[in-house]
Image: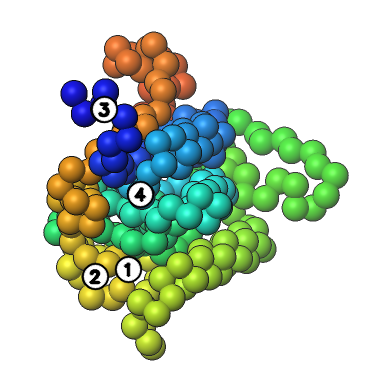
Amino acid sequence: MKRFIPFLPKPPSVSVIRLQGVIATGARGGLNDAGLAALIEKAFSRGKPKAVAIVLNSPGGSPVQSSLIAARIRRLSVEKNVPVHAFVEDVAASGGYWLACAADHIWADETSIVGSIGVISAGFGLDEFIQRHGITRRVYTAGQSKSMLDPFQAEKPEDVTRLKQLQEQIHAAFIAHVKNRRAGKLPEGRDLFTGEIWVGAGAQEVGLIDGTAHLVPKMKELFGKDVRFNVFDQRRSVLARFGLTLGQGAVNALEDRAAFARFGL
């Protein structure tokens, strides 16, 4: 009956966005700025929310997509004057923690894995394998760095040096983002940017999260017991809704599984 009574104040609302999975470009699926843009915009705009809550479960992925998504969240938070709370479920590591830092406050479960502030690149060397099978790799380039880190050629020290230079630049941007967003909360003189991970209260001790808490009780604590939750979900394809993955989708699922497995999940 309350909704039919004019001028009756509405209970406060909180918009909830679930960010689940590996962060990757559109071709890979998962979390990316293009796929999340409309969802995030709606969460900040509909119903005049008191806050936006991000339920986060990601082992990381693309640093570019992490940066783009986080920047969109920050821009809308400032424009709409709406605070953001991140709630970590299983893991917010690497790019997942980059997303968490888009929030004004970060909360986690006592057993959540948080951190891994670093940059990783991995691959395979197949040059000896193809030699054993009588296969010759032929590569023609204009530009001496064009075939850098070709997995079918022997690894070159200069290629590894160039890769590490790129990684260091990305790592520096990651560190700057964390220091900016967690300003005044990180301990002095402690190196938190080695790729190390923490669990629950340990992450709070080093300032990576603000405390251990769960979505519903924390939002009720902050905005009252009558607070409403408006959930904004990512749209999935018809195949995904029925649990069907074909071709490249199956490969992507295995890669995503491997990314979570790095943290014992």
Which mark is drawn over residue 208?
Answer: 1
Disc 1 or 4, which lies upstream in sequence?
4
Disc 3 or 4, which lies upstream in sequence?
3
Frontmost of labels 3 and 1 is 3
Disc 3: which residue: 5
Q: Is residue 108 visible?
A: no
Disc 4 or 2, which lies upstream in sequence?
4
**Residue type at numbered disc 1:** Leu
**Please, what secondary structure does the residue beneath circle 4 have?**
loop
Q: CA distance from mark 1 to mark 4?
A: 24 Å
Q: Quadrant of residue 205?
A: bottom left
The residue furthest right is: 142
- Where in the figure is residue 64, as x and y percent of width and height? 57, 49
The reply to whether the C-beta atoms of the residues labelled 1 and 2 are less than 8 Å apart is yes
What crowding class fits label 1: few (fewer than 14 Cα within 10 Å), some (14-19), or many (20 or more)?
many
**Please, what secondary structure does the residue beneath circle 3 have?**
loop
